[in-house]
Amino acid sequence: MLLAFPVSMASAQILIRVMDQDLGTPLEGAKISVTGIAATFVTDKDGKTEIDPPSGKRVVVRVDYPGYTSVKKELEAGQKTLDFSLELVSSLEGSGVVISGAKPQVSDAQAGISEVVTSQQINQQTMGINEDAFSAVKNLPGVGYTGSFDAKPSINGGDPNETVATLDGAYVLNPYQWQGAYTIFNPDIVDSIKLSNGIIASPYGQVMSGLLDVSSKTPTDRQTHMSLDFSTTGIDAAVEQPLGDNAGLLIAEKTMWLEVPLWLFGQGSLFSTSPYMYDTDAKFYWNPSPTVKWTLNAHYDSDGVASNFGSSVFGLTDIQTLFSSNLKMLLNDNLLWTVMASGNTFYDELYFQGEDRDNSALNNSYYDRETEYRYQFKNGFDWTLSDTQVVSFGVDELFETWETRDKSDLWKKEIDGSYTESRVDVTDKGKNTVETGVYVNDNVALIPDTLKAEAGLRIDHAFVYGGGELLMTYPAFNPRVLLTYTTLKDWGLCQSVDFFGGTGLYSQFPADNQYMDTHYGVKSLDLGPTRAWFNELGLEAHGHEGESLTFEGFTKSYFNRFYTATDGSGDTVLKYDGTGYVYGIDFGAKKSTRLWDLSLSYTFTVAELYNPGGSGLSSSDWRNPLGTWYAPSYNRYNTVYASFLYKPSDGFSVLLDGDAASGEPQETGGRSAWNYPINIKLDWHGFHSGSKTRWEFYVACQDIFSELYYRRSTGSASFGTGTPIPSVGYKLSF
């Protein structure tokens, strides 16, 4: 009986509501099509209409509105309302306000630019120790291997630090927890994640390889909603509360602890503080008029652990806060103004205390603390010149600084057998970095529905000051262009094919580099940001029945790369003359039916870097040798991902997904063995009879074949446990 959950549609009327996603305004005149009903419904001035769905059938509701993306949703059992948030394509309408033209940087997928995963896809793939919204991103083409306990992606062969994450437009200092094991993004608050790994448009700076653009849910619903999730390792809760007719508040809490599973496995004594993660998100939404939308976001996350090794204790604590404010306003019929301000703080603490290994009567202690600060301001405009052209322009500012404290009390054994105590207590305030970006971007349909061009120029400049120094850089000019040609429309089984090609320059300035000082060999007007020249060529095909196929080839050339070396005195020297190249191919295929969804991706990447070094310099790390070409530690030649979701009924589904990834470079030479983590999830869900309360129960197991490959590999794909990880979860939402 668990494998079949019968669904019958209620005969009562269903309320349909259609809103503009950016401004939250109702869309009057939207056309509603319902499977099994010949008639077409139209929304009123409040963006609403009611339908009588046919009983005993799978009901799919489609919404169409001129200038917006069409959206389809399936009506679930017991559902009384169905909300649609439409994204702008070629027009935006409010009460008496019209903006025509193709708005750039919409959050839907765009050939040659981005791929998008929705909240529904995220919910289907989350499981395990910590339900992470990134679970649904790792299967996209261009994403290097990310397995259990490893959420940092190598996008198009780039260093994971070259991928920038934003939360509702605000850059995030550290989007990871547990030193990169998971991301900070709670699936309960995420509406969609857009991964941009192609020609990223000029409004975005400080990006070298990829952009993870996370959009949180906006509390536009006029009814109170709550959800409560339980699993073997945590509890999550969320509430969405309307505040009048034009405002709302969303609050979500996510807690993860390991006391229970550690106790069950008899390993509770390993930790004085068991591993934990806490996340809190809040979003306030206000739509005072059809032309104004304001949101205020707050995020807090913390994670840590303290482990016991006999009489020794090792501990780690991370804390991050992020506040941002976004305002969107239609100034006139053709001009949209967007302004955003944010503040971000990240605190990292590491400590150790224990017996000296040579003399148990002596104690060693070590304490390291680092705090980073980032403040951001963005001001941009979208100006519609015609029905087929929109020009965007604006400026953004980043201010970043940091400070550290190192405190230690260590004992050193001398040649004569005596011990000398060494005490250090140093607080170092880092230099301040100001980064300015100015951009202009032109999105134009050269031939409507056939040939589209997006071209832009971004100019980035940075300078560093503090400690009596001023380090200037020359402005970095970053032009970018992408052409998309659409053909084979409605040709046989093919809905359309997009051929795309583009080129662009990108730069990233390492504001948090502790060696950004003349003491380490840095010279004003000599240093600059790391630069990369990216090129791509590919195609994207779509079928009439939910099929899609993507194929892309790319190259990337690095220059002015930063790296460190050691001089003859043992001091660190910061160099910024590194070069390198990356090339590869990405392939992706998707198919969706009523009974099953299939997703496949393959990424092949070759990355080679070169650090010239210099006279009297030696390598400070085996991962960064001097005077020779080498593969970076994050490079994997092959990454394969597959996901199969089987939906035999409306109340049950089975998810089987997994990676296969070739090894990474090793210090002793060669590469580690292939890894292939496979996950399975069985999910039962539905509505409690006669109510709007939705329930979900899942049983899952991650890395089910880890015993077969982990123990005989020369190196693991991540710092995983080497054993399968079972999990159970139960969710309620109403």
Image (cartoon, rainbow, N blue to C red):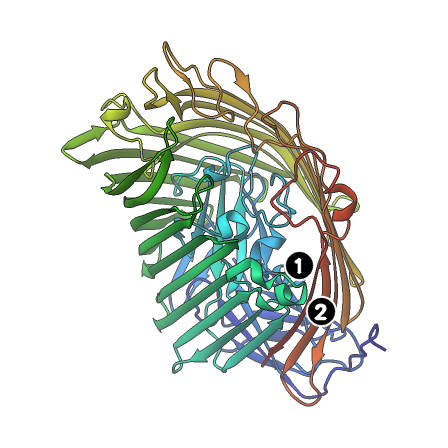
| Residue named by callout 2 | 698
Q: Secondary structure at mark 1?
A: helix
In the displayed structure, 391 sits above or below 251; it is: above
In this view, which residue lies farthest toward the top? 615
Q: Quadrant of residue 260?
A: bottom right
Q: CA–CA distance between discs 1 and 2?
A: 11 Å
In the foreground, 91 or 209: 209
Q: Quadrant of residue 617?
A: top left
Residue drawn at the location 32% of the way across and 18% of the way down: 569
Can residue 634 be seen?
A: yes
> Picture coordinates of residue 77 (x, y %)?
71, 80
Left or right? Give the position of 308 relative to 421: right
Q: Is residue 227 left or right of residue 431?
A: right
Give 114 or 386, whichever is nearer the viewer.
114
Numbered disc in front, either 1 or 2: 2
Which residue is label 1 attached to? 125
